[in-house]
Every structure is written in structure tokens, then in C-alpha cells.
Image (tube, helix red, strand yellow):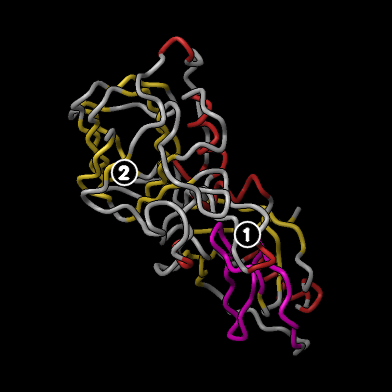
Amino acid sequence: MSLIVHKPGLQSTIQDAGREGFRKYGIPAAGPMDLAAAQLAQLLCNNHHDQSLIELTLHGAIFEFEKSAVIALTGGGAIALLNDAPLPYNKSVVVKAGSILKFQASLYGCRTYLAVQGGFSIPQEMGSTATYLPGKLGGIHGRALQAGDQLRFNREQPNERSLPEIEVEWFNPALSSNQVCIRFIEGPEWSWFSKEEQNLFQQTTWTIHPQSNRMAYQLEGNALNMTQKKELVSTAVMPGLVQVTPAGIPFILMADAQTIGGYPRIARINSTDRNILAQCRPGYLLNFQKL
């Protein structure tokens, strides 16, 4: 074996670039919440973008390396310590056999990506290793990592010569502040809301609810009421759409979101800002800006 999980932290899952081609069967792509950070981690390890890596939520995880490896950490949400010494993010690092990697609490951010050169050796399900927890699909038996899990590396020996000689200055506003501005375009049912409600959506400072997860972020703030009480036939939905429930509560659909829904879609978040959202933890404040 190559990596031993001593503590998984709040939630750690195996992800790759996502499971494509199965939405018609009700199975979303899943994959990284912060796609940009995950792709950067792969780049720093000279990996293909579709290799398996670990997505960690917040802090608490402890890993042990049985073998030497080249790794990269990206994203945020935790302070990394390698053998009790600070380990930088956004840089390729050689880790020696027997090393212990810990993640402690930080002020900002939510998700860290741990890539190893060559990726982790994980069996594919439906063409992907991405963990989809609601469907118990992918990853390690369709679940989050647990203490005692052992993950093999695809590469037996690290190849330091193949590393890109770069250290990236990575900027994501959610990694330095607990209040961010999220840009959007009008959703298909934008016109179902009055001008007053449209303005309220943009002028409210929303709070991310504690029950938010990889499926959706629930927002707390002013209730949005439709002036036109219309029923929406269940239709296709995807990550980035903002749905509004009959109670006026907005939900932002995230990586593990269902594939169909029946609530009005007031807005759609642009792809860049979905990466910002991925680094927002419960309690963060959001403002919306229309493009």
C-alpha cells in the first residue's frame, strides 16, 4: 500500500474529472467542487486531468505515506503540516516514506485537493472514480474515506525530473474573506419573479446554511416570493443553477446535484464563480451580481 488514512477529517472523498454521459439515467457527473484547484493540483504533479485525487473538506485529516511520493496541495480550508512542519499549497513537494501529513483548522476556505504523481489506483465505476455519495458510487465502495483505508499509488517511484518547476500564486477570494460576490446570469424562470423580487435577490446579503453540502448550498436571508404562481414541470438542472422553493428559499446546486428538478430557476452561476462557491463554508456571506 502507499497512503494510510489515520483520520479522514470531516469528509474526504476520491474524485476525478467527473462521470460524464449518465445524466439521462439520473446520475450526475460529481467530480471536484473546485474544479480549478483540482486541475492545478494535477498540473503540479504532471498528471492527466482525469487522475484520481482526494478532496478534503475543512480540517482533521491525518495521512501516512508508506512510500515516497510527489504530491501537491491546492484549494484551502486547512493548514497542512508535514511531519509537524508547515507544508505550502500550490507547489510540488517530495514526501519521504514514513511521513505524516496533518490538516489543522484555518480561518478561510473549505476544500483542499491532495494529488499524488500518477494518481491513486482506484477501480472505475461507470467510467469514473468520482465519489457520488447519494448514489454510493465510485471512490472507495461509494463512501467517504474512513480510518484504516489504504490507497495505492499508480506510480511505484516518484519522478522528480518530470515535475513542472513552478510555484503558483493562487487567488480565490473565498480563501481570504468570509464574504464574497458571486456573478450570475438570468435563469430560465427569472421573469417569474417581480422586479422587486429580482432586486431583493441581488441586494440581500445571503448566509450559507449549516446543512449545505456537495449537492446544494441552502441560503438564509429574505424569502423570495413569485408574483406569478406557476407550476414548473420537472426539467433538467445542473450545477450552478439557483432554484427557489415554494417557501422562497434559494438553493445553489453544486457538484452532486440531482439531474432534474421542479423549482423555478432564478439564476445561473458562471463557471468561474462556482469555484469560489466551492471554497465557501457554512456561515459565509454571499452577494449576487448580475452579468
Rendered-image quadrant of the N terminus = top left
The reply, left or right, for residue 198 in relation to residue 18 is right
Under tag 1, what secondary structure? loop
Residue 255 sits inside the magenta stretch: yes
Q: Residue at x 44, y 41 (%)?
A: 176
Under tag 2, what secondary structure? loop
Residue 257 sits inside the magenta stretch: yes
Q: Position of residue 99 (x, y in %)?
A: 20, 27
- Amino acid under label 1? Pro
Q: Position of residue 202 (x, y in %)?
A: 66, 64
Q: Residue at x 20, y 45 (%)?
A: 6
Using the rendered view, name the quadrant where residue 73 is placed: top left
Q: Position of residue 66 (x, y in %)?
A: 22, 30
232 shown above or below 283 = below
Q: How many marks?
A: 2
> What residue would you read off at disc 1?
239
Query: Which of disc 2 and disc 1 is earlier in sequence?
Result: 2
Q: Residue at x 39, y 46 (%)?
A: 108
